[in-house]
Structures are given as structure tokens and as C-alpha cells.
Amino acid sequence: MGLLETLRGEGTGADDVCKFSREHYEVVYTVSTDTHEIAHAIAVGEAELDALADLLRADGEAEDREGSLSAALEAALDGDEADPDAVFERMRRPRRVTEAVVETWEGLLADDPDVVYLPIGMAPDLAAFVAVCRERADGDDAFDLPDSFEAVASLLVRIKEATDRPENRVVVHRNRLPTLEA
């Protein structure tokens, strides 16, 4: 939808635009839901992002992480109707979300230090990835948490605080948000 159509009031159905008004200034902002999304603004330091990237690397370098997970799934679902591939993909989602977050946030911190954006609903996947890594380190798995893990824990606390506060929600262009490849 172009600017002229918006000004004329054409094609402004409820599904393709969002309006935000600022009554004090008598201004209405209109953005397309195709290009913008509501997200949480998060303050992130470079050391914290590096720590999260270190955790991803450590998880990726661990011995046969996906092989043992796949075998455990097949054993657990023996004879059940659940699709092991779908369950396996759901279990991989937290890692994929974390990869997307790290990649996007590295670019954002290069442009605008200290502020990144997290789409609503991604925080639980980040927390799940970190929890799985912590459980693997505590268990029999030959996995060790990186030395920088405390910075990741600190980042998760800040993400939790930011996502619990509605005033931290912002409208942001989708190209500034982490996305999962289909």
C-alpha cells in the first residue's frame, strides 16, 4: 500500500495497518503490519551477546548432541502416533531461535549499541535453550558451560524483566527483528 492510498483512506483494512495515536500532539502514526511488529526493547551489552554466542558454539561443538536426542525421542515415542520429526523439530526450535537472535543482534549492536529487539514470544525459547544447556552440563553429557555463562544468565534476567513490562514494547521494522528460516 502506497502513501497516496493511505492518505485517501483506500486499502486500510484492519489486517494490513496499525494506527498509533498521540493525542497530546494530535498525531496518528500508521504503519503496515506487513513491515512492522511489536517487540520488546532490550538493553544488551556486547559481552553478554558474546557470551550467548559462546554458549551456542559450545552447544554446537558438543559430541553427538542431535544423535543422542534423536535416539531418545524414538525410544520415548515407540509406537505412539506422534511424528518424531515434528517433535524433534520442536525440540530444536530454542536453538534455532537463539541462533537467529545472536545473528540479528550482532548486526544491531554494530549500528545502535546497547539496544536490540526481541519479538513477543521468543523469550521462552531463549530461556529453554539456556536451560537445556545448563541441564546438559549438570548431567552425564560431556558438555561444559563456557566461562562466560554467568553473563548469559544475567542477560536472561534482563530479558525477563523487559518482557514483563508493557512499557518496553515498541513498534519496530521487521528487518530489525530475529526471524526463523522456514
Image: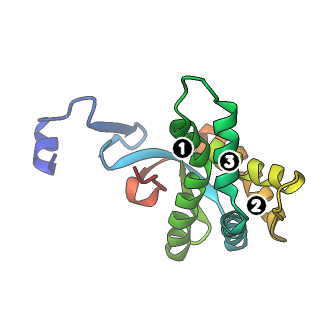
Q: In this view, does 34 lie to the left or right of 77?
A: left
Q: Is residue 177 above or below residue 63?
A: above
Kindly identify the residue that appears in the image at 64 percent across and 54 percent down.
Answer: 66
Q: How busy is the neighbourhood of tag 2: few (under 14 within 10 Å), some, or many (20 plus)?
A: many
Looking at the image, tell me whether mark 1 or mark 2 is earlier in sequence order: 1
Kindly identify the residue that appears in the image at 16 percent across and 46 percent down.
Answer: 1
Residue 50 shows up from this direction: yes
Q: Point out residue 136 in the picture as x, y percentages from the top left corner.
A: 81, 53
- Mark 1 to mark 2 CA distance (whole Å): 24 Å
Kindly identify the residue that appears in the image at 42 percent across and 54 percent down.
Answer: 181
Q: How busy is the neighbourhood of tag 1: few (under 14 within 10 Å), some, or many (20 plus)?
A: few
Q: Mark 2 points at which residue?
A: 152
Residue 115 lies in what quarter of the image? bottom right
Q: Point out residue 84 in the picture as x, y percentages from the top left corner.
A: 56, 36
State the residue in front, 138 or 71. 71
Q: Point out residue 113 in the picture as x, y percentages from the top left corner.
A: 58, 72
Q: Mark 1 points at which residue?
A: 89
Q: Is residue 84 left or right of residue 36?
A: right
**Do the numbered discs 3 and 2 sit on residues whose CB atoms are within 8 Å?**
no
Kindly identify the residue that appears in the image at 71 percent across and 70 percent down.
Answer: 54
Q: Name the residue under label 3.
A: 69
